[in-house]
Image: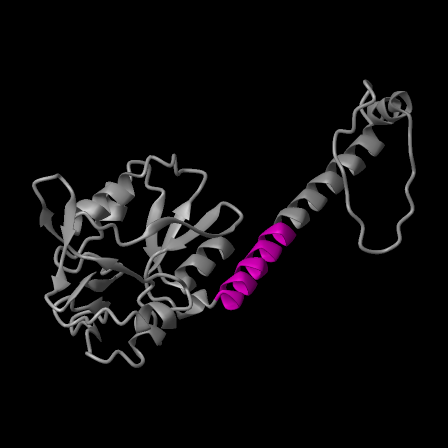
Amino acid sequence: LMSDGKISSSVTAINNVQLLGLKQSLFDKLLELDAPREIITQTARKRKKSSEGMELQVGSLSLLSFGVDHQLVNGQSIMVINLDRCTRCDDCVTACATAHDGYPRFAREGKKIGNIMFPHSCMHCVDPLCMDGCPSGALHRSKEKGEVLINLDTCVGCTMCETNCIYDNIVSLPIAEGVNPSGEIEYKSNTSNPKPILKAMKCDLCVETGDPACVRSCPHDAMKRLTFDEIFNSTTQ
């Protein structure tokens, strides 16, 4: 306890311990002696160093467990946002929409652990479940770097990929065709079916430019694209 009666710190014990309480005045007198002060100082330094190492190890193990539980280890290009840096300005979402005809390909929300958030954005998985059963073959890998892409010209809007993606990183949206005289948006549809034609949408890593607009536009360097190994290793170094 501090002299004003407030608790300066707290501890948690896993096993049984014995606790010795001293009045502040008595503790101050002990610190006036060289030997006790040196012992206490050295012990405090050792315990602080050990505690920091334990916190780092526990944090890394928690992240690993989190990655396995949520199958993030399957991702080759995971969108990661440092919440300590992010100001929620949404410049990343705006840049994504601008690069894709007004359709943002991700949502700035998702699972969190500590100060890290994994938004709903395609991770271009090692084993992409979304590609299984695509009837038109619209979902495919690029030949250059293996990104998982959607050919909107051949997508039939069956929503099978959206259902198969366990990360909720694919959405099916109607495609705008123009604006009518009343100012309402008109969507593409078949002549025999007035319902709007749906197309699957997801992040394509801005393959045409080779540089994700979302990452490039972040004014605070809060967003990165990493493999899970890179994310894990960055917490253990």
Q: How many badges with numbers are in the image? A: 0
Residue 80 magenta: no
Quarter of the image for the N terminus: give it: top right
Q: Residue furthest top?
A: 4
Picture coordinates of residue 10, whole percent (x, y): 76, 38
Residue 59 magenta: yes
Compared to residue 6, the image places residue 151 above or below, namely below
Picture coordinates of residue 155, whole percent (x, y): 18, 70
The span picked out in magenta is 53-70
Tell me if residue 116 can be seen. Answer: yes
Picture coordinates of residue 21, whole percent (x, y): 91, 34
Nearest the viewer among 94 and 24 is 94
Report whether 107 appears left or right of 142: right
Colouring method of the image: one colour
Tell me if residue 128 can be seen. Answer: no
Residue in the image at 22% along x and 43% along y: 95
Compared to residue 217, the image places residue 28 above or below, namely above
Nearest the viewer among 13 and 128 is 128
Report whether 226 appears left or right of 18: left
Res 129 quadrant in image: bottom left
Residue in the image at 44% along x and 68% along y: 73
Picture coordinates of residue 122, whole percent (x, y): 32, 61
Compared to residue 137, the image places residue 210 above or below, namely above
Compared to residue 36, the image places residue 74 above or below, namely below
Report whether 77 appears left or right of 186: right
Nearest the viewer among 30 and 224 is 224
Res 217 quadrant in image: top left
Report whether 210 appears left or right of 125: left
Secondary structure mostly taken by the magenta-highlighted segment of the chain: helix
Residue in the image at 44% along x and 50% along y: 117
